[in-house]
Image (cartoon, helix red, strand yellow):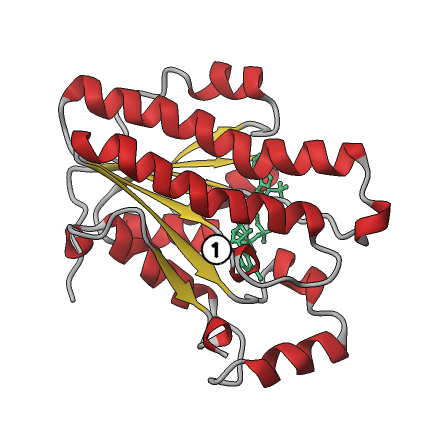
């Protein structure tokens, strides 16, 4: 299946590491002009060196005002990947106000803000667009210690449906990808417990975690015209975890 984004501009958040970084590269390989947004300057510098031509924006998406300042006038964007997120592990009884606020701001509020900026631009230009929100299997299945993170991913799945409903008439499609564990810097935070790894793989019919490229392929499919009739939906990149 050939996917070609020539002539389109894409914006990817959380582009410094992990899934976001490889999504940027795959989009560029498919012909898109890419804006890579992340928080750690060094990651963006190394990405620019590795991939000349990529535009970079360094901003902390937890901060609404800083995001507006950095991205409010970003110009035309046709494809948006809301990928940035943080994962703070705390048992439910110890969840702090700070952890909850930070997680909501980074994982959910920023998605609304950035999607507003991009969707308003698409509507003003009268062109179609596609938004992919990177969710997780924990939007649908509980895992210990992930109160804040899972709550934002559950909300993200429903946010995606509301966005699909309201933006669909403007030919802007909105979908999620919901991966199982991927061994990125974030994935390694939860997978350093051998018992957890064993239990996760045991429940997964394919018996393994996802690779970064498994997630990137699904993101590109949902961004592309190959998924032209898919809206308000989600792809479970989970080896069947949620089927069991
Ligand atoms: P990662 O390795 O931790 O990378 C996340 C990237 O997002 C980093 O570059 C990080 O920058 C950036 N970021 C985080 N908060 C930010 C903020 N406030 N402002 C700007 N940039 C920010 O994570 P990943 O595993 O690639 O995860 C990508 C997405 O997949 C996330 O939405 C995650 O929830 C989802 N997901 C991951 C897994 C998994 O097992 N890895 C499973 C299911 C879903 P800094 O490093 O500079 O903070």
Counting from the top left corner in percent of width and height, residue 120 is at 29, 20
212 is higher (above) or lower (below) than 71: below
Crowding at dot 1, Cα within 10 Å, few <14 / some 14-19 / many 20+, comes out as many
Q: Dot 1 corresponds to which residue?
A: 19
Closest to the observer, 40 or 20: 20
Q: Quadrant of residue 143?
A: bottom right
192 is higher (above) or lower (below) than 101: below
Helix, strand or loop at mark 1: helix
Closest to the observer, 143 or 6: 143
Residue at 28% across / 36% down in the picture? 165
Q: Is residue 10 visible?
A: no
Residue at 82% across / 38% down in the picture? 96
| Relative horizontal placement of residue 230, taking residue 89 as reference (left or right) | left
Report the label total: 1
Residue at 57% across / 67% down in the picture? 181
Asked whether mark 1 and ligand 1 are closer than 8 Å, the reply comes as yes
Which image quadrant: the N terminus? bottom left
Counting from the top left corner in percent of width and height, residue 156 is at 48, 43
Residue at 17% across / 31% down in the picture? 169
| Relative horizontal placement of residue 153, taking residue 189 as reference (left or right) | left
| Relative horizontal placement of residue 28, taking residue 138 as reference (left or right) | left
94 is higher (above) or lower (below) than 99: below
Q: Is residue 51 visible?
A: yes
Counting from the top left corner in percent of width and height, residue 146 is at 70, 54
Counting from the top left corner in percent of width and height, residue 28 is at 29, 48
């Amino acid at each position: 299946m050939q996917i070609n984004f020539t002539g389109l501009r894409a914006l990817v958040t959380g582009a410094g590491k992990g899934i976001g970084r490889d999504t940027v590269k795959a989009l560029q390989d498919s012909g898109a002009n890419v804006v890579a947004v992340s928080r750690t300057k060094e990651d963006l510098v190394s990405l620019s060196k590795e991939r000349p031509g990529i535009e970079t924006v360094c901003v902390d998406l937890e901060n609404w005002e800083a995001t507006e300042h950095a991205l409010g006038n970003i110009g035309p964007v046709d494809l948006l990947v809301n990928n940035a997120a943080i994962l703070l592990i705390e048992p439910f009884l110890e969840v702090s106000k700070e952890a909850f606020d930070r997680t909501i701001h980074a994982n959910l509020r920023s998605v609304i803000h950035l999607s507003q900026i991009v969707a308003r631009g698409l509507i003003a230009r009268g062109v179609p667009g596609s938004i992919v929100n990177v969710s997780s299997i924990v939007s649908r299945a509980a895992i210990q210690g992930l109160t804040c993170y899972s709550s934002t991913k559950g909300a993200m799945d429903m946010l995606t449906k509301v966005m699909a409903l309201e933006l669909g008439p403007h030919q802007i499609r909105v979908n999620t990808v919901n991966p199982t564990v991927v061994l990125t810097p974030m994935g390694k935070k939860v997978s350093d417990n051998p018992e957890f790894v064993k239990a996760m793989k045991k429940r997964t019919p394919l018996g393994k975690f996802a690779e970064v490229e498994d997630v990137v392929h699904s993101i590109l499919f949902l961004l592309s015209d190959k998924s032209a009739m898919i809206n308000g939906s989600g792809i479970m990149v989970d080896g069947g975890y949620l089927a069991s």
